[in-house]
Image: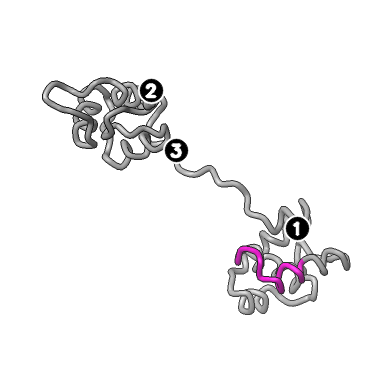
Amino acid sequence: MNKKYSVCLTPDERLFLEGICHKGLHKSRKIRRAQVLLKSDAGLTDEVIASEVNISIPTIERIRKRFCLEELTSALEEKPRSGPPPKVDLRVETEVVALVCSSPPNGYDRWTYELLKREADQRSSQKLSKSTLRSILKKHHLKPWKKRCGAFRT
C-alpha cells in the first residue's frame, strides 16, 4: 500500500532521532515518536511499527503527517491542549479574596474553610466546594486561619 506521507530522513535528522531513542533522557512519548520516524524511514509497514512501538496505526499516520507538513520538532513534541475551562470566574474569585481579607463574622476569631464556604455561598450565585476555595486561597497566597491574613501580613 502506498503511504500518503512518507518519511525520508537526512543523516543529521537520523542521528538526532537515534540520540533521543538511546539516551533515555526524554519523555516516553517523544522517544516513541522518534522510533516511529526512524522505523518509517527504514521502510517498515505501519502494522510492524505499531507492534514494535506499541502504538496505534492512526497515531503513526499523524506523526508521519506532522513530520512531512511541519518539521521534525513539531512531529516529536506534543501540541498544547486547551484543558478544562476554569471552574470559577474572576468575579467570584475576587469576591472570595475580599471576603477572606475582611474580618470574620461575630463570634469567630478567624476564618475556616467551612465558614468561608458558607459565607461565599450566601454572597455568590455560584456554589463553591472546599477544594475550589482551597485552590483560590493557594493561588493568592492567603492563609486566613493565621492571625494576620494575606496581603496584611507583616
Mark 2 residue type: Arg
Q: Can residue 1 be seen in this view?
A: no
Q: Residues within 10 Å of mark 1 (few under 14, many from 20)?
A: many
Q: Does the magenta stretch include residue 82?
A: no
Of labels 3 and 2, earlier in sequence is 3
Give the quadrant of residue 31. Answer: bottom right
Q: Coloring scheme of the render?
A: one colour
Per the rendered image, the range of residues in magenta is 17-29
The residue that appears at 11% across and 25% down in the rendered structure is 107
Tell me the distance, in whole angstroms, between the alpha carbons under discs 2 and 1: 43 Å
The residue labelled by disc 3 is 85
What kind of element bears circle 3?
loop
The residue labelled by disc 1 is 67
Q: Where is residue 23 in the image (x, y as percent from the top left)?
A: 70, 71
Query: Do the residues under discs 1 and 3 have CB atoms within 8 angstroms?
Result: no
Of labels 1 and 3, earlier in sequence is 1
Magenta stretch: helix, strand or loop mostly: helix
The residue labelled by disc 2 is 91
